[in-house]
Amino acid sequence: MTYQPNRRHALQALAALAATGCASAPPRGASATTVAALFAGNIRDQGFMQSGYEGLVQAGSTLGIGTRHLDGVAPQKELLAAALRQLAQAGPQMVIAHGGQNNAAAQQVAGEFPAVHFAVTQGDVTGPNLSSYEVLQEESAWLAGALAGLSTRTGVVGHMSGIRVRPGLKGRAAFADGLKTANPGARLLTNFSGNQDDNVLSQRIALAQMDAGADIVFTMLNAGRDGVTQACRARGTRQIGNVRDWTLGDPAVFMASAVADVSRAVLMAAQDEAGGRWKPGVVRKLGLADPSAVRLAMAPDVPAALRQKITAYADAIVAGKIAIPDSYSGPEFTPAA
């Protein structure tokens, strides 16, 4: 999706979207609980937004609750706030804002609807009726960096993402630290393009990183990942994916995937609401200690010796022996115009 930067057009698009928001009712005899969710992106992006949406669908089918959602909203505070307001006005028990880009908007709108429970996934905001749920993708991203450092032949590794939201920045910092720990001499080429979904842009950046020597590229993208995959296939470069296990579908390109099942954050929030366990003012976290949610998946051709090293690193993270930084202060990669 290409977002319209014009404010008036964007607000008109939001109004049209709000008018067509999708909803499902709970089965007869089920709880009257309704959970609404906002996805600031495409719920068919095969990445972060789709995973969150799948968590909402699972919540509806397993908990017997009603659900409603809006998607395709540009990650701009006023548009996110307007969408959250639209969802809250319909009177659900809970509104979930999927993604840390919703932090500021959720804090604002939660204050306007004190009777509604709000949750931000991959966020860090709290309030009297607001909590956050975070799947610690930085833990699997750290392992991805370590694997890249142990596997690179050129000594140059790429990282690509889109918008600079807190979870993405934390993931980049973790990847950089894992790379440095495993291979102190490796060089990192890191780029935030400003767009999670633009395949033409992502392919151009990937090719530029490959021209600069990168033989492994770690992607934290949504619908724009395919542009990188095409570049990798053309150049014989390996990729490390994120969110879901990309090695299952294309192990020739994806040597690994930093799995962080963010559907679990949406599902946990809905479970807490439906079960009467939701609490305000807290941040619930899920990491490598639960490998069904967070892990580094590796393709069959990753040698056993490397797998053992990654397992040792993962055990050290769970045991608290490795502290993962949440910020990166190194150079940024900017491709030629």
Image (cartoon, rainbow, N blue to C red):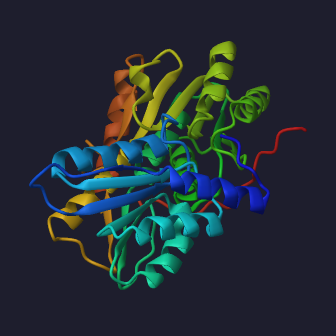
Q: Is residue 170 left or right of residue 137?
A: right
Q: Quadrant of the C terminus?
A: top right
Residue at 41% of width from left, 36% of height from top? 244
Residue at 75% of width from left, 27% of height from top? 207
**Where is residue 222, by image quadrant?**
top right
Q: Is residue 229 above or below residue 52?
A: above
Seen from the viewer's position, the closer of residues 27 and 180 is 27
Q: Quadrant of the N terminus?
A: top right
Residue 120, how many percent across, how many down? 42, 65
Seen from the viewer's position, the closer of residues 88 and 277 is 88
Residue 58, how many percent across, how many down? 26, 44
Q: How many marks?
A: 0
Instruction: Check the image and name the residue furthest to the left.
Output: 29
Q: Is residue 141 left or right of residue 285?
A: right
Residue at 69% of width from left, 37% of height from top? 198
Q: Is residue 95 above or below residue 147?
A: below
Seen from the viewer's position, the closer of residues 116 and 126 is 116
Let me know if residue 326 appears in the view: no
**Where is residue 204, by image quadrant?**
top right
Residue 147, how many percent across, how many down? 48, 35
Let me know if residue 301 appears in the view: yes
**Where is residue 213, by image quadrant?**
top right
Residue 36, how many percent across, how many down? 37, 60
